[in-house]
Image (cartoon, rainbow, N blue to C red):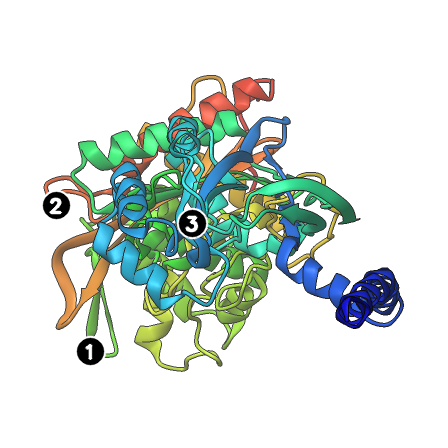
């Protein structure tokens, strides 16, 4: 009886023993299955949860001036980002409030932003923060909130170079100026690395470098920061002194076409995002057009000299101070009587230059203006450059021919004027303006007889001598060839009363030209608006320092030749 009772117990014992013996085999089989058949799948699932590819931001290239001074650099900064999937799960209200208070955001707005992007793993909270704020963020130790290294563009010269350089956006991509024009050159190529993160999104370990970040290439500009600063200082002072609306200055090397200085007023500081509005950051020297006025008279005279009928000493009767042309009056500020061609430029006689233009063969003057690049892009490779306006064909209307001779009926930019005067300075060869230092030489076409160009420069010296319209542009010890232009501005109902553009364009040293500068002052106080006293002093100050810094010797008086 007792043996029968023990048998079931023995059977159960052996069943347990066999089960325990089979269990390791089952576990071993499962392990083999997981390793051999499901290993790749499981590895991938693990990687998806903990391995991430992180972008390595590339440094943008540095922009230098012609002497190696830094004009634009990219400095490393930190940005705050969050993983909504973590931050919204871990004591969300308190964490979001703490972060929002620290970075100066509204907690409700931040929470709404994170909630609307809850399916993402990366959302920026604040870009480009200070080192102090970055330390405070780290100190919070909030799961799902992290820092990422980025680069922020910095412009050491601020508004002095703002219009030339332009600016970049928060992602360090060029948006205007040189930054935009040469963005592909300056931009680097981002790298990538694979990292291991914990469940809070924190980096635990760098697993693999996928590719190195490749920095952008540096850019060397033709701008001379010393002259850029002087041009900025003098233009700003003149605009304030004359209560003007604005102004522009371009300083160019006659032979290479290199732009050594280019400034505008009002200015903007690309380091301050609040300054970045279109009205302030456009480069007026390149984008804004105006009727140039009498600064164009030397070009009409050049066309007349090239025709062979006139010489610098040819006399023209300008009495009684006005000329009737096709029912319209062309007037001088007073009756100059009989003037030589040289005197017409010195006194800036509208009547005299109009008479010369009316006697030219059809299209000669217009063709010279077209050859000098008016109505066309200069080729400077600057975004937003205006081509100005010159009629597609020569006008046959006498009054339009007359007014074209003293700078009405066409529109130009300050840079176009500088280019045209550079052709006069370079014995008739038209340069291609450039903002790049040591750019490959581009030999422009000869658009003016060298003898005419030399004669023109000699005559234009008188403009800055006693009796001329621009004595304020004279530089002691140097001969300056130049011309003033005071033009009326067009309003809704025609030419507006009391609104002028005052321009001076000059060449120095006149006997062996090296530099051309054009100064434009927009809407100076109408109580004194003539270009000589308004724009002349800016030219003198800038050109004097340019001649000194580049160690150009004073030149002797030019001989007057007919």
Q: Which residue is mark 2?
A: 526
Q: Determine whether 541 is above or below 528 in the image.
A: above
Q: Residue at x 46, y 68 (%)?
A: 119
The N terminus lies in which quarter of the figure?
bottom right
Mark 2, Cα crowd under 10 Å, few <14 / some 14-19 / many 20+, is some
Q: Is residue 53 visible?
A: yes
Q: Regarding mark 1 in the picture, which secondary structure is present there? A: loop
Q: Determine whether 200 is above or below 288 in the image.
A: above
Left or right of 463 on screen, residue 489: left
Are discs 1 and 3 less than 8 Å apart at CB? no
Q: Which residue is mark 1?
A: 327
- Residue 13: x %, y % from top left: 79, 63
Q: Determine whether 68 is above or below 428 in the image.
A: above
Left or right of 286 on screen, residue 3: right
Q: Nearer the viewer, residue 66 or 372?
A: 66
Most distant residue in the front direction:
1
Are discs 2 and 3 less than 8 Å apart at CB? no
Q: Regarding mark 2 in the picture, which secondary structure is present there? A: loop
Numbered badge on residue 341: 3
Can you tell which quarter of the image residue 104 is in?
top left
Q: Residue at x 87, y 61 (%)?
A: 21
Q: Residue at x 48, y 64 (%)?
A: 120
Q: Nearer the viewer, residue 305 or 404?
A: 404
Alpha-carbon distance for marks 1 and 3? 25 Å
Tell me which label, 1 or 3, sits earlier in the chain.
1
């Amino acid at each position: 009886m007792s043996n029968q009772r023990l048998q079931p117990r023995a059977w159960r014992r052996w069943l347990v023993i066999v089960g325990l013996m089979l269990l390791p085999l089952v576990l071993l089989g499962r392990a083999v299955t997981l390793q051999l058949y499901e290993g790749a799948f499981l590895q991938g699932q693990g990687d998806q949860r903990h391995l991430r590819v992180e972008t390595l931001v590339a440094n943008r290239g540095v922009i230098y001036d012609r002497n190696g001074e830094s004009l634009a650099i990219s400095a490393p900064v930190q940005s705050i980002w969050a993983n909504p999937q973590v931050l919204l799960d871990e004591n969300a209200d308190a964490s979001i409030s703490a972060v929002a208070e620290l970075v100066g955001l509204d907690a409700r707005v931040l929470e709404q932003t994170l909630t609307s992007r809850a399916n993402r793993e990366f959302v920026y909270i604040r870009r480009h923060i200070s080192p102090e704020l970055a330390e405070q963020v780290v100190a919070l130790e909030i799961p799902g909130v992290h820092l990422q290294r980025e680069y922020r563009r910095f412009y050491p010269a601020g508004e002095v170079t703002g219009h030339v350089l332009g600016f970049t956006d928060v992602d360090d991509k060029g948006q205007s100026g040189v930054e935009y024009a040469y963005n592909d050159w300056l931009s680097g190529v981002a790298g990538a690395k694979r990292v291991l993160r914990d469940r809070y999104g924190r980096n635990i370990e760098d697993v693999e470098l996928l590719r190195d970040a490749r920095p952008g290439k540096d850019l060397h500009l033709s701008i001379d920061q010393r002259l850029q600063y002087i041009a900025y200082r003098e233009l700003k002072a003149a605009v304030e002194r004359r209560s003007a609306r604005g102004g522009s200055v371009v300083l160019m090397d006659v032979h290479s076409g290199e732009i050594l200085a280019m400034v505008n007023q009002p200015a903007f500081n690309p380091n301050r995002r609040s300054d970045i509005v279109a009205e302030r950051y456009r480069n007026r020297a390149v984008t804004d057009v105006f009727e140039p006025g009498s600064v164009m008279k030397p070009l009409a005279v050049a066309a007349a000299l090239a025709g062979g009928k006139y010489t610098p000493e040819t006399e023209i009767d300008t009495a009684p101070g006005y000329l009737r042309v096709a029912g319209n009056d062309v007037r001088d500020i007073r009756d100059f009587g009989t003037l030589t061609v040289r005197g017409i430029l010195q006194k800036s006689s509208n009547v005299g230059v109009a008479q010369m233009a009316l006697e030219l063969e059809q299209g000669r003057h217009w063709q010279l203006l077209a050859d000098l690049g008016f109505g066309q892009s200069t080729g400077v490779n600057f975004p937003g450059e205006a081509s100005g306006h010159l009629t597609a064909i020569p006008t046959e209307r006498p009054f339009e021919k007359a007014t074209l001779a003293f700078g009405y009926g066409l529109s130009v930019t300050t840079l176009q004027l500088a280019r045209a005067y550079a052709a006069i300075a370079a014995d008739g060869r038209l340069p291609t303006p450039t903002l790049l230092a040591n750019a490959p030489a581009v030999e422009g076409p000869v658009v003016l007889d060298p003898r005419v160009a030399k004669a023109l420069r000699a005559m234009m010296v008188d403009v800055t001598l006693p009796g001329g319209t621009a004595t304020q542009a004279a530089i002691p010890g140097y001969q300056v060839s130049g011309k003033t232009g005071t033009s009326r501005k067009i309003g809704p109902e025609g030419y507006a009363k009391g609104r002028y553009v005052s321009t001076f364009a000059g060449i120095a040293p006149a006997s062996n030209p090296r530099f051309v500068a054009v100064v434009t002052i927009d809407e100076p106080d109408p109580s004194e608006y003539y270009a000589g006293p308004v724009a002349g002093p800016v030219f003198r100050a800038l050109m004097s320092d340019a001649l000194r810094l580049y160690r150009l010797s004073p030149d002797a008086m030019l001989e007057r030749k007919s």
